[in-house]
Image (spheres, rainbow, N blue to C red):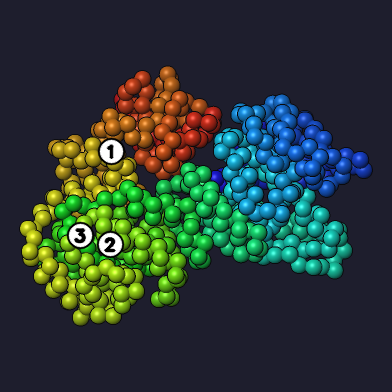
Amino acid sequence: MSRICKTDSFGKRLCTPSIVPVGRDGPLSIQVDDDTRKLRVGPLEIEQGAKIKPPLSVDTPGTIRDHGDGIVSIRLPVPTNLSLLTGARLLIVENAFELRRDPRALARTVSALRRAAGPRPLLYLQGIAEPGNLALLCYMGVDLVDDILPRLMAARGVSLRPEGHFRSEAPPEILEDLNLQEMDEELELLCAFIMSDRLRELVDQRAPSSTFNVVALRVMDNECWEFTEEYVPVTGGRFSCNDAQSLERPDVKRWRRRIDEVYCAPKHKRVLVLLPCSARKPYFTSRSHRRFINAIRSGGHFGLVHELIVTSPLGLVPRELETFFPAAHYNIPVSGEWSCQEKEIIFKMLDLFVRRNGYREIVSHLGDGGLLTGSLDVIDTSEGDPGSDRALSLLDKTLRELCSQYETVSAQEDRRGNMASMLRFQFGDGANCLMEGSTVVGKYPFWKLMDGKVQLAMHTPDRGMASLTLKGAERLREAGINIVRIGDFMLKGNVFAVGVTEADRSIRVGDEVVVEQHGQLAAVGVAQMNGREMMDLDRGMAVKVRHQVA
């Protein structure tokens, strides 16, 4: 939900995420005198009570005030009627300070307000931000905070750092400057993480600085997962999973759910081979996996063998999905030890995976001594060292013996089965429309899906998933998958949100989408917003067009 935005809506250029200052000029600012505290939003002044102390909800709880021009303020607890939030440009939570007492309430409140108001308004939580929770608040979907709390804590002799709170003997005025400097530096850092698509890493680093942050993040990951997942792209760059909470990242959890609920293995596969992961991604580029592949595919039986990589935090990665995000992008510390949580995840996923896909034989080349396979009936070929010549020779011999009882599978049938599996994982049940009457040509991972001499789609490791041509997009349009409908205008280049009239709510940033106009195919490209953002926003690029109908 984190984002970097620029707007001139409040009289001056405002870049978010941003800190609203006390006593300084800006697009938004807080002005304090002996009797009053006012929030200035451009030319508008909003009375907020005496001095700097945040107002308490016991005064007028659960109310919404509409200040005009799309500026709405709310006092907690969250009112039951949130209809005034529709069309808001700025949503101010005046007494958010009280949420510091309850991390669960913070996560639930931000989630509830974002669900009701949508992605359009800037969300401003007053009196709650400090260096240690700034990244978390931004990750939750908060665009604006202020420096009220750092000033209050300085007056109490408390130094604020991202790593925690510390008592200080420094004069309050010096301590205040230091606290504000820490806020500015943390804001600069989190903007850098947002720009590199790695904010969740910073959040995971900062969360352990307080029990409050840990609880709030857990609630966001568990109770609010469906909300946060909607705003998490299906493509991205490299990231690290260095602690237990990263097991619950929305993109990681989405992967595991799609493996459990959407994925189907190629139907011609008879023997499942379990393989360990590698530090280098995608796996096929690593030295260890090149040796595994050579041993598995040394005979004509390779089409019968399905390779499945067992790893944390993703659980399971079928070979044909290894270039997808996040399978090709995660890094983990490898100590040779598995936590109880990791083992439980793999036990459950592996048991369901085997039952859903109906393999005749299972070969484990994990070298784990049966630690991860549980009660499954497997043949262990690892010899305690999966990469050794002896183990690889045994793997080759075992697969030849097991596959000898089945008819061989042609290379074309194997490629079609793998491509069908990939497309189903990417687009869902209806993706079979792309496979009808088609062939797959090329050498993995550079595959082209062809209808005769006409290309429908192409898979490359750079994109990590199938990219559609106009012919492929037409098939997807007829199946009603990932449709973005636009209004009556001349499409030139990319599609912007202002021109979108309807969008599939299942669309995520990075998805392949089909642009439809007047009931006909207009273009195909990559989503730059999720489906809800395309509908709710009136500015910004919605689809980066790859091909357009002439």
Work out whether 177 lies above or below 41: below
Tell me, for residue 308, which label it has, or none: 2
Q: Is residue 243 left or right of residue 396?
A: right
Q: Amino acid at mark 2?
A: Leu
Q: Residue furthest front?
A: 375
Tell me, for residue 430, which label it has, or none: 1
Q: Quadrant of residue 39?
A: top right
Q: Amino acid at mark 3?
A: Tyr
- The residue under label 3 is 359
Label 3–label 1 contact, CB within 8 A: no
Q: Amino acid at mark 1?
A: Gly
Closer-to-camera residue (500/401)? 401
Work out whether 186 lies above or below 34: below
Q: CA distance from mark 2 to mark 3?
A: 12 Å
Residue positioned 65% across, 54% down in the render = 103
| Earlier sequence position, callout 3 versus callout 1 | 3
Label 1: how many Cα within 10 Å (few below 14, some 14–19, many 20+): few
Q: Is residue 206 left or right of residue 128?
A: left
Label 2–label 1 contact, CB within 8 A: no
Closer-to-camera residue (520/481)? 481
Tell me the element at label 1: helix
| Earlier sequence position, callout 2 versus callout 3 | 2
Q: Is residue 454 left or right of residue 469?
A: left
